[in-house]
């Protein structure tokens, strides 16, 4: 591919992967621009992790191409033929920590840096900054068993930065963290984006996607449902206002004349969701039902996500 | 472009196994003392108990028409067995921990290091640990004056090869394992019979005929036949043949282990 017409750092074209008769990834294409944070969101089993594994050359696609464009006049690299050259430029945080339990934080970084054929002196010169970035300076010599879940995730992130990568691949980086640890992780990831790192992130937390990503790709059943900036996706796919109604007798409203006051109505559990361009008339009508509880809010990514991927629990997930 | 490469393709060799090997070395240095006790104390206790205890009863063993003190007979065989056991333990239990339980391999392969390098590092690491173990045992044997043949200098690298053979074979079973329990089969059904069929504790001509035939093909038999004469300051008979058997087991074992490990990681 010609670099002049392709400003991207990483691209995936027509990627497909089948396991037996199940198509896990189906003709998926996307690209990441330098300095961009692309979020891949989708329910469990949507094909996010398989996509990441193919991007890393750990799974072989049945069809399609994965390319990396190092820039600076260097030729494009292809997975899996140039896997080692590509991985030398990547930082990866996988879904499950693979830190070394026998090592301290600093040793984890040192040993991992050696895998990139970096000289010890260079790695050691970077360790203080990396620990500082991960807020783990005071834990430099601590064993892994002394770290909390959030600390381990941040150490995984610091480890992924040891080779000063051009692109970071983060597979559900905050799954399982408490809110404090999650916010600290977000703050660090935002700092990386500001520094100009490109990021590919998978998540099923919509607030995470909205906060961190310049652009989002919604994946379900291995297929791309839609793609765009969080704001555009909401504006293009949803009515701006949402009124949630719940309480005794709420479900009956879904089939009542009130339905005409909303563009779209959905029922989930004991709650009715009214999607509307303007909630004024609907809210006025709801005043006649004081026993019901209502919540009026702007449409968000979660609404989009549920509209595109459905409200059903994925039994196979 | 469904161009899935063959599982049986040749290993992609590079020096990228070295940082992985250094990782194992760093862990080991932290756990040196318990690891030494397990790997070295046990074989030495066996040697002393059987060698001096049973040796007093047996006295000498007839080997190719020559009378050999039992302690020397046992020492030269059991050191091969120690090489086998040390390599097997490391390439089964420890490698499986790193591969499956701790996901260490997954972390390593996020860096520019591929499965072939990771497996090569495991194989060489298990062989190195085995060589370290037998080096200490050899020193103790020298101190006990069991043998002081200059040919021990040749026995030493050959014992390193024995470590390579058994770590390669063990990695086949590592690739097939679902859990640690699986390795019990390997130890009980393969290594323990191997120990008794390979002439470690008594000469192989004591075995019934068909067992002697099986024994001929065991890698530990080749190791013992190759290394025992060196303890007696003699050149082994059919030395090249035994060496060839060990090399075939080492290369073949690693190749199969690599193919099965690739299969395990392929998805």
Image: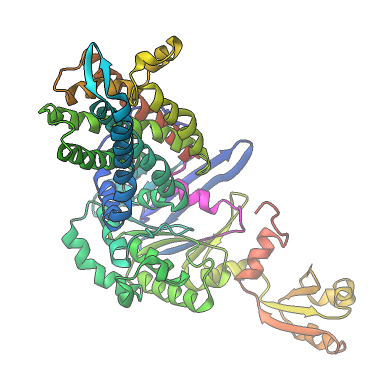
User: Quadrant location of residue A34?
Assistant: bottom left
Residue B109, image x, y percentages: 37, 48
Instruction: Look at the image and say whether residue A50 sits in the magenta stretch.
Output: yes
Quick check: A162 above or below B184? Answer: below
Quick check: A256 above or below A16? Answer: below
Residue name at image x 30 percent, y 36 percent: B47
Residue range (magenta): A40-61
Q: How many marks?
A: 0
Quadrant location, the C terminus of chain A:
bottom right
In front of the other: A132 or A192: A132
Q: Is residue B25 visible?
A: yes
Quadrant location, the N terminus of chain A:
top left
Residue name at image x 66 percent, y 69 percent: A303
Residue name at image x 34 percent, y 35 percent: B167
Q: Is residue A79 visible?
A: no
Instruction: Look at the image and say whether residue B177 sits in the magenta stretch.
Output: no
Residue B58, image x, y percentages: 31, 24
In screen coordinates, is A232 left or right of B73?
right
In screen coordinates, is A236 left or right of A141?
right
Quick check: A284 above or below B121? Answer: below
Residue B75, image x, y percentages: 26, 31
**Outermost residue toward the front?**
B57
In front of the other: B61 or A186: B61
Residue name at image x 29 percent, y 41 percent: B44
């Amino acid at each position: 591919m010609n670099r002049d017409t392709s400003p991207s750092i990483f691209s995936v074209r027509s990627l497909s992967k089948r396991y037996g008769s199940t198509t896990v990834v189906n003709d998926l294409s996307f690209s990441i621009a330098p300095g961009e944070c692309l979020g891949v969101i989708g329910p469990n089993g949507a094909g996010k992790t398989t996509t990441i594994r193919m991007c890393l050359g750990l799974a072989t696609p049945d069809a399609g191409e994965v390319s990396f464009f190092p820039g600076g006049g260097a030729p494009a690299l292809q997975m899996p033929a140039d896997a080692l050259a590509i991985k030398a430029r990547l930082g990866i945080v996988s879904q499950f920590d693979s830190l070394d339990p026998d090592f301290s934080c600093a040793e984890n970084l040192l040993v991992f840096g050696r895998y990139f054929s970096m000289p010890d002196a260079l790695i050691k010169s970077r360790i203080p900054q990396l620990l500082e970035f991960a807020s783990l300076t005071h834990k430099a010599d601590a064993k892994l068993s002394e770290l909390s879940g959030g600390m381990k995730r941040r150490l995984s992130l610091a480890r992924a930065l040891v080779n000063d990568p051009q692109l970071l691949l983060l597979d559900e980086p905050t799954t399982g963290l408490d809110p404090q640890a999650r916010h600290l992780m977000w703050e660090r990831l935002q700092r990386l984006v500001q520094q100009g790192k490109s990021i590919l992130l998978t998540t099923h937390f919509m607030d995470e996607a909205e906060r961190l990503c310049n652009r989002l790709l919604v994946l379900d059943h291995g297929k791309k449902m839609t793609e765009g900036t969080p704001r555009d996706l909401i504006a293009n796919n949803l009515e701006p206002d949402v009124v949630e109604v719940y309480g005794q007798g709420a479900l009956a409203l879904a089939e009542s004349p009130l339905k005409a006051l909303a563009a779209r109505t959905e029922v989930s559990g004991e709650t009715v969701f009214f999607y509307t361009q303007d909630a004024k008339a609907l809210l006025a009508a709801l005043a006649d039902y004081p026993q019901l509880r209502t919540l009026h809010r702007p449409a968000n990514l979660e609404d989009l996500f549920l509209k595109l991927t459905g409200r059903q629990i994925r039994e196979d997930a | 472009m469904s161009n899935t490469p063959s599982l049986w393709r040749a290993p992609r060799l590079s020096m990228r196994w070295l940082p992985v090997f250094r990782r194992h070395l760093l862990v080991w240095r932290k756990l040196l003392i318990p690891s030494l006790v397990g790997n070295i104390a046990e074989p030495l206790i066996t040697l002393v108990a059987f060698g001096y205890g049973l040796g007093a009863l047996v006295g000498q063993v007839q080997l190719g028409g020559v009378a050999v003190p039992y302690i020397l007979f046992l020492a030269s065989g059991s050191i091969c067995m120690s090489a086998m056991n040390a390599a097997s333990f490391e390439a089964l239990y420890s490698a499986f921990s790193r591969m499956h339980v701790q996901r260490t391999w997954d972390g390593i392969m996020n860096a520019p290091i591929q499965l072939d390098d990771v497996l090569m590092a495991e194989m060489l690491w298990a062989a190195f640990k085995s060589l370290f173990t037998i080096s200490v045992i050899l020193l103790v044997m020298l101190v006990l004056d069991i043998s002081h043949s200059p040919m021990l200098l040749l026995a030493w690298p050959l014992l390193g090869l024995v470590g390579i053979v058994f770590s390669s074979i063990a990695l086949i079973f590592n690739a097939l394992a679902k859990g640690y329990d699986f390795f019990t089969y390997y130890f009980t059904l393969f290594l323990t019979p191997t120990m008794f069929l390979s002439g470690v504790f008594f000469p192989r001509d004591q075995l019934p005929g068909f067992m002697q035939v099986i024994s001929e093909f065991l890698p530990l038999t080749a190791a013992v036949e190759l290394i025992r004469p060196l303890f007696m300051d003699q050149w082994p008979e059919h030395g090249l043949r035994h060496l060839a058997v060990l090399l075939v087991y080492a290369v073949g074992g690693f190749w199969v282990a690599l193919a099965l490990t690739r299969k395990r990681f392929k998805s």
